[in-house]
Amino acid sequence: MNTILFYIIIGIILCDYLLERYLEYLNNRQWSNVVPKDLQGIYDPESYKRSQEYYRANVRLSAITSTFSLIIILLMLVLSGFARLDELIGKVTGHPVASSLLFFGILFLAFDLIQIPFAVYDTFVIEQKFGFNRTTVSTFITDKIKGWLLAAIIGGALISLFVLFYEMTGTAFWIWVWIMVTGFMIIMNMFFSTLIVPLFNKQKPLEPGSLRDTIETYCTKTGVRLDNIFVIDGSKRSSKANAYFTGLGKKKRIVLFDTLIRDLETNEIVAVLAHETGHDKHKHTYEALIAGILQAGLTLFFLSLFIDNQSLSAALGSDIASFRLGLIAFGILYSPLSTIIGLGMNYISRKHEYAADRFAAITWNADDLSQALKKLSVKNLSNLNPHPVYVIFHYSHPPLLQRIKAMKGINKKFFIFL
């Protein structure tokens, strides 16, 4: 076993775990028994207390879940579990594709089964206690089975092609895999809402009425073409509300949760839609896609430099070089750089949210969007006062108070410059 690499891997895993616990500790210090001045008028004392209880319940579960996962992974490393599984599969089949599918399939299924009790507790205890859960046991089981089938079909196809490219081209595999991943990301961006979402939720066009009329008036005013406005039955699983923009080109669509329509006034719904439209106007979807493609290329390039290094396999307890063990070792060693890249991606995402807010404020109404965001935050018992460091690491959206502050004073006369 490569001792130095082994301890580096252990160190990275432990540092990541301790960092998460420290960030949660910082966040927890932000809470108080009295509603902070900045939150007065948004949270009443009772709702503020419930939001703290909800946050702490989730933090406790997260700490237990991550601690359990840490113990499992450390045991797998110390006892050479990954190497033993790789060796066992090698005795079953020597075919590179079949052995890789078995190896990663077993790991995926085992780790997912381990996580099920925690997911059950989260859904049927925490979410149920705070009035969010609408998921039935039948839906939970069906979702899990569908998820496994999708993972087997899509994940299996991607892994198979990955291995074939590696077998055929050696270390040049990263170029071909990058092309494959790029194509997959583009297809998912274009067709996710029409291919994947219907497997889990029903979507239907927004019905004629005052809401659609108001939306169409807004679209005419701003020159936005939004033929594909859909309502999704989010209430099937949760009472939380949301909306999102998906697709590329003619496949673009706005999706509104039925809970959003239920909880907000018409003007507030249009404000949320205007925000999502802002992402489209500013080409954020394309920018995020390009950034994801570049990140994937960078990761695969670095992987190509180390994948044939026998030391990676040795660090996991194998005496012979293994493509599969190399992938796992590299994934752990690469995680610090991945975290740094993630910080940059989160920063860009938060900038995009500010830009989309500004678009909505200019083309519709800042007060309507602010009110909508307040209602959704209170309804979802969101943490409205997170620690700044926690925001840097984990928030793809700016905290509510910062978003409201940024929208103050925006003048609609600047609309002509959009």
Image: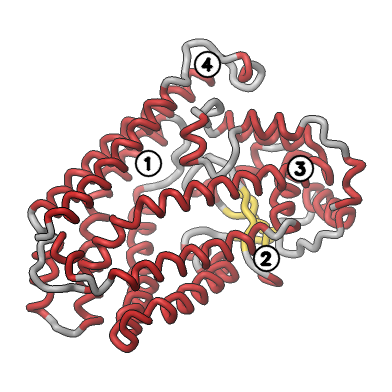
Report the front residue among 188 and 46. 188
- Residue 281 seen in the figure: yes
Residue on which disc 3 sits:
358
> For residue 80, what is the image quadrant?
bottom left
Q: If you read the primary sequence from the N terminus, does the residue marked by circle 4 or circle 1 appear first?
A: 4
Q: If you read the primary sequence from the N terminus, does the residue marked by circle 3 or circle 2 appear first?
A: 2
The amino acid marked with disc number 4 is Glu
Residue 252 circle label = 2
Horizontal side, residue 70 vs residue 192: left or right: left
The amino acid marked with disc number 1 is Thr
The residues bearing labels 3 and 1 have C-alpha atoms spaced at a distance of: 35 Å
Residue on which disc 1 sits:
123
Residue 46 circle label = 4
The residues bearing labels 3 and 2 have C-alpha atoms spaced at a distance of: 21 Å
Q: If you read the primary sequence from the N terminus, does the residue marked by circle 3 or circle 1 appear first?
A: 1
Residue displayed at 51% across by 73% down: 182
Q: If you read the primary sequence from the N terminus, does the residue marked by circle 3 or circle 4 appear first?
A: 4
Residue displayed at 57% across by 45% down: 347
Q: Where does residue 186 sit, x and y in percent of width and height?
A: 56, 72
The residues bearing labels 2 and 1 have C-alpha atoms spaced at a distance of: 31 Å
The residues bearing labels 3 and 4 have C-alpha atoms spaced at a distance of: 32 Å
